[in-house]
Amino acid sequence: MEDAPETLEVASDEPSPLDNLNQSQDMQRLARCLDGLEPDKRDMVMLAYRQGLSREELAQRYDRPVPTIKTWLRRSLAQLRDCLGT
Amino acid sequence: MNDREDIDGLAAEYVLGTLDASERTAVAARRQREHDLDAAIGAWERRLAPLADAVAPLEPPRGLFARIEARLSDAGGAGQIVELQQRVKRWRNLAAAASAVAACLLVVMGVREMVRPQAPSSYVAVFQKDDVSPAFLLAVDLQTRTLSIRMVAAERQPGKSYQLWIATEQSGGVPQSLGLIEDRADITRTVLTSFDPAVVQTATFGVSLEPAGGSPTGRPTGPALHAKLIPSPK
């Protein structure tokens, strides 16, 4: 947001070029932060978010107990939050 | 610290979609009352929103899918999927083949049913009074071994009774009484239950004019009409 002052936002439902730029910047930032996770943890977050896998399904896939999966998810998400700084 | 992290972790998993159904319901209810939780959820929705963006999907990290596939085949997952797909195909083929066989059978049976007339169980016997008028009509159902007899052109004779007889090979052609033909136009009886259907089918039936109340001797004594069974026209 620091790059895009609110006064420049266009009052329209269509995303402005600036919105798109912000979006892609958000995405790039998120992608960088995801890359900072261990590969397993990153895959896990992606699978959960994009394919809707539950803790149980992740536990089966990664052959770990459900509580372990929960701990991994929470740690990974906290790491993401800290990386994003938002 | 612990509290804050717990709420934030809960919010993160809520947005990520990994909570189970009961946890999810609980969080959805709690966020209505707990501002912290609601705000944390909002923050996580913004953080992860780029992942959900369908217009400009995030390029997955390089090698992600290769790693997923490798993991799947490590776990035997890919192999299982291929095997399941093959199994599904096999079953589908089998089901199609079975359906085709069933359809053929249906046609064959249908044709046979049309070509081969059903073994009839309904027979009639017509007792002719003269060349043109049937006096009595006898209908026999071999399956239920019931008979019904109807007076057609026959006329009641005062002081007399009509009596129905059956003569079979088993009885050496000796008539056995099947009872009197009452005034009612159409009567149904189950007097044939003691006879074998095949015997009934080839038997000779007779109607004789007897004294009122039937033959006094147990054999026909008056003038008689005779008839044999023919398959009932449908």
Image (spheres, rainbow, N blue to C red):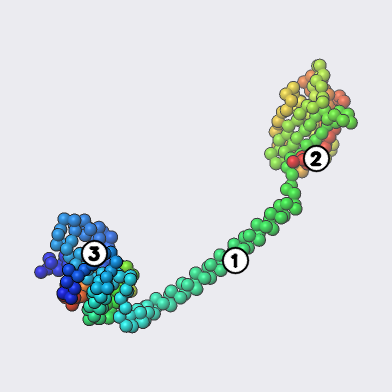
Amino acid type at mark 1: Ala
Q: Where is residue B55 in the image (x, y as percent from the top left)?
A: 33, 71
Q: Mark 3 points at which residue?
A: A11
Q: Is mark 3 on a helix, strand or loop?
A: loop
Q: How far apart are marks 2 and 3 (CA)?
A: 96 Å
Amino acid type at mark 2: Ile
- Residue drawn at point x = 25 percent, y = 58 percent: B25
Say whether residue B159 is left or right of residue A36: right
Q: Do labels 1 and 2 share a chain?
A: yes
Q: Position of residue B86 (x, y in %)?
A: 50, 73
Q: Where is residue B73 in the image (x, y as percent from the top left)?
A: 39, 80
Mark number, residue B230: 2
CB contact under 8 Å: marks 3 and 1 = no
Q: Position of residue A85 (x, y in %)?
A: 16, 75
Disc 1 packing (10 Å; few <14; some 14–19; many ≥20): few
Q: How far apart are marks 3 and 1 (CA)?
A: 62 Å
B175 up-or-down from B76: above or below:
above
Could you tell me if residue B146 is visible in this image?
yes
B4 up-or-down from A34: above or below:
above
Residue in front for this viewpoint, A34 or A61:
A34
Q: How far apart are marks 1 and 2 (CA)?
A: 45 Å
Amino acid type at mark 3: Ala
Q: Mark 1 points at which residue?
A: B97
